[in-house]
């Protein structure tokens, strides 16, 4: 989790793993973005947003590779609400199946639990694997796909790039697809533990909680890679940056325009520059996370593993 | 870990568990504070600061009850440096013995591991207990004190106030003293994982990482209580507050005095007020913690348990 | 888990925590035992046996204090069968409620997770607590009883008798009843992971997996104590003893009566004596446990915590 | 841990992972075995036995492939004795270096922690990895070899053969050698937690605690494989078998020769046959393990990781 301010402020924007958030800071008043198709619906209190990046313009605009990004938002994910969580798991399983179909309905899937079991906000991936129905070793083939799983650990534990470990295992066992679970970094604390993102584009360098993420993509592994994650942290630098915005608004509201100018008149670039000076090197590797992160991650891992089990085992 | 902004900004100051930091924001140019005696020394690269609060004036000034606060600072605590860590453990054991002497050299000590094993930054106390030499149940009395230990868990796990659990156990087993280990909240990220604080005053409500701390003091338990802790988090609100300071300085440095005024001319109270507005309710329960917190806590728990074992078992 | 052969062969019989098994080795051909009432029924593939010890004769005969012992047996407990396990949890919750009614329908219950989280077969109690719905600290009173919970650890970890820790907490927090969860030692490997025993008599010295069990009873704690457990180990000595029986039968079957005599003509007492010589001191502290004990304990802890949650929270 | 009686009684002998034990049940009165060279020495209370299988006759006699097997025995391994354990770790590091030299002094080593972190007696491998100094990812090359490590998990967790996972990682990262840590099955309970075996022959199918072991050898991986392990379990079947021996002796001693005949006159093969009938299917998958296995495994994992760190990092 040693992300540098450079990574945090990738391309003149505060970095986020969520296409949902990346698109918010792009687009015109109407939220239109060339090369990006957005669909939204709400069902049983679950808000589903599909962000489809169709071409280079879209990639440029939101800083994510072309592909489909589906986000499920459900505030209830935070409560211990078996019915509600079950509904989310079922909705999730629907979209996992959709992405697997698009990936050619593979009859075997390797589920990869990225992250560090020892660091609560980074333990989502390993915890999901704890509750997964593994069938890859069973003689009699059940319904659904044959499921195998691996928790590769992080570089500080293995001394190896996680991507190489997965690459070796994929080449050896040749699954039909990879489903990579990862804890994500969000832009806004309001998304922590409440948004589940599925994407057809796999894992990109620099994404996820921590810097132990290297490319896990169809190009690098030779099989389709679906990424599934939930934001559990926000970069401390992002919080600081927000302060400048809030401050400007506050002063403005206070009718202190002239005085606020110092902040207001700074363009985004200047602000990032200032925040970098404000935070480096103190806050570079720092993360903001909720106090009850353990309960959130525990609950999320159950919902995600249930969604995966529904999608793969039935 | 649900501290409110009100707690974070206790008494018009950003809250810190470290007397060391509390005293920094008090005092005159020369750092003199009425009712507070400060002694500093450096040995083997370990900086030891004793803050003794002698009367009401001191309590008022730094917001800590009268008593002795000893802080060991050693940057090397961050590295895997057996020799260096051993040196810190030995220095720590010296001061534990000093405080035990002042507590009447009890022949039995109950070590309490406060916090939540499931939340990495809050797991310091439970982890220290994992490596403790427990002797309370042994027939043949060895050298040093008879050591018992308990990890009471947190309220969300037990449904009981931790203080009441400890109170019940102390009344039943009657140890000569209590040594309470706790993860602390610091004011500055530079102190995370680098400062060990020992105090003769026990645990106070609202201290520690999280709000599951109630009074563990000689008054409440009837036996001397020594508190031992290391900061593992900083309240997100504190980071935001720092931004305002840095911003003011930055603008000042930039010769933008007039414009900086908006921030500069605010007195501390106004600034806390503004930060409260900036952060509530978004950041109230949020914490800032280093990305490699797991390694830091693992290392710290070894050093602390070694220091305690040296002090109690020999 | 340092049980001695003396404990293993309590009162001239191989020790078992299950009243079900204790009664099998007592009684006449018809299985009648003076002072013991036995009721059996089967429902949804769950076999429920109630052993009620009504007086001294019964206590003598099966070596358990007077009281009610209910055992639920369900082979399916071994499989990952959500429906089946749910059925067992519901049946269990029914009997927990029954015993709570008999204990005066307390409006607050302290659930105690006995055992050692670090030793798989002894981790049942602590694991059940991991999945318990704790409500003791909540302001708004929900339906059912107010639930608190504690994992006291074992003597090697705390240096204190577990019974004293619980005694102190009970005196301090005054719950209406205690529900003590414990891993048990069975007589026959066929019962490992398949039998759930509930009893109105609390925990007795020497019971459970390991020797860290002291009295947790209404007499010692001042509130009703319900014990809930599942056998996860068999004393190695019991296996050896069985070998002698099987051997005798085998030789007999082989028509080698004369030769078998050596074993056959030994009375029980002589056999225990011989086994003691055969096994002491090598096997005294040894336990027999299934290879997949981790999966069994994980599954059992879910079923038990679900049963308790149903009984206490609704 | 689903070993069948067939595996337990491999080749008409009770199976053991320890060459030390295999050789005890072979050999003539003088303990001479054709094709097996044995060297013994004692130093600082550590007994070191080298069993070198030089040819087919030796392989036949002790049922282990040709190669070097070094066993360190130190009763003190059971106690918390820092000095003593350090001495064992240093002795161990000496032999690890010897075997690495014989393997061509590789400048990079992949340490594999076999077993299941969730099953105490099977958790030795994963726990050793917890304390390993990993350097494979570090830019500046330190002294000694570059160390990487992996905990592949067991088949029930991954759905993949552990050997294939390792094979894939080795092919991808090309370490100079593999050091495989594993919990072993012994023949005698007196060896549990007291004997450390190092071998140049890697891991063989059916070895280790549990049946999740497949070939990890130079032939299968293409790089030298050193195996390091400590026995933590004995097959329940072995205990039963011992009972027959002890019984025969006991009866003999009791002058009951005629009667004992039933047992005495049975040849080894008949006895295994009888034990199979006695134990199958009840005890097939059952294991005997000490009650304090958690402390033993914790201590052993520290000693082994210290030995490896000394051998590889200096």
Image (cartoon, coloured by chain):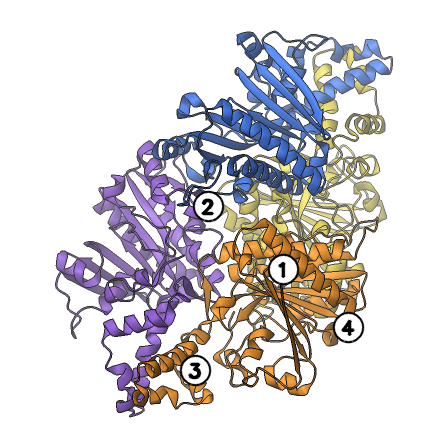
Chain colours: A yellow, B blue, C purple, D orange
Q: Position of residue B312 (x, y in %)?
A: 51, 36
> SS at mark 4?
loop
**Which quarter of the figure is the N terminus of chain A placed in?**
top right
| Badge number at residue C157 | 2
* Quarter of the image where the C terminus of chain A is located: bottom right
Evaluate whether label 2 is on the same chain as label 3: no
Which residue does the image show at 69% across and 24% down from the upper left?
A: B240
Instruction: Quickly name the residue at label 3.
Output: D276
Task: Judge the density around disc 4: few (<14), some (14-19), many (≥20) Cα neighbours within 10 Å.
Answer: some
Check chain identity for marks 3 and 1: say if they share one.
Answer: no
Which one is closest to the eye, mark 4 or mark 1? 4
| Chain for numbered disc 1 | A
Can residue C36 be seen by looking at this rendering?
yes
Looking at the picture, does residue C212 appear above or below residue B217?
Answer: below
Relative to the observer, which residue lies in front, C223 or B146? B146
Q: From mark 3 to mark 1, how far is it between C-alphas?
A: 48 Å
Place of residue C308 in the rendered image (x, y in percent of width and height, measured from the top left) = 36, 49
Q: Does the CB distance between marks 2 and 1 fall below 8 Å?
A: no
Report, in whole angstroms, how far the alpha carbon at label 4 lies from the one at label 1.
39 Å
Q: Quadrant of residue B7?
A: top right
Write the residue at 75% across / 30% down: A282
Kind of element beneath mark 1? helix
Q: CA distance from mark 2 to mark 1?
A: 48 Å
Tell me which residue sits at (73%, 22%) in the image.
B243
Image side of residue B145 versus residue B119, left or right:
left
């Amino acid at each position: 989790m040693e992300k540098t301010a450079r990574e945090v402020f990738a391309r003149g924007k505060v970095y986020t793993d969520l296409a949902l958030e990346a698109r918010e800071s792009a687009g015109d008043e109407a939220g239109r973005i060339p090369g990006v198709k957005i669909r939204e619906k709400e069902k049983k209190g679950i808000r589903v947003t599909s962000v489809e990046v169709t071409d280079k313009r879209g990639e440029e605009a939101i800083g994510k590779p072309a592909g489909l990004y589906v986000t499920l938002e459900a505030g209830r994910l935070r409560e211990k609400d078996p019915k509600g969580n079950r509904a989310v798991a079922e909705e999730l399983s629907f979209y996992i199946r959709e992405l697997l179909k698009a990936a050619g309905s593979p009859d075997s899937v390797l589920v990869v639990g990225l992250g560090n079991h020892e660091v609560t906000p980074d333990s989502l991936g390993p915890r999901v694997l704890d509750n997964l129905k593994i069938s890859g070793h069973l003689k009699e083939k059940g319904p659904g796909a044959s499921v195998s799983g691996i928790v590769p650990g992080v570089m500080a534990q293995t001394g190896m790039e996680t991507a190489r470990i997965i690459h070796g295992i994929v080449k050896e066992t040749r699954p039909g697809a990879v489903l990579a679970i990862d804890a994500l970094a969000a832009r806004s604390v309001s998304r922590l533990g409440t948004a589940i993102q599925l994407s057809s584009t796999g894992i990109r360098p620099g994404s996820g909680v921590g810097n132990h993420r290297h490319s896990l993509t169809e190009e690098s592994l030779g099989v389709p890679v679906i990424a599934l994650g939930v934001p559990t942290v926000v970069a401390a630098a992002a919080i600081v940056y927000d302060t400048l915005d809030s401050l400007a608004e506050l002063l403005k509201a206070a009718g202190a325009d002239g005085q606020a100018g110092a902040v207001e008149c700074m363009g985004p670039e200047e602000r990032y520059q200032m925040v970098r000076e404000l935070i480096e090197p103190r806050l570079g590797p720092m993360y903001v996370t909720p106090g009850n992160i353990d309960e959130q991650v525990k609950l999320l891992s159950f919902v995600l593993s249930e969604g995966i089990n529904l999608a793969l085992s039935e």
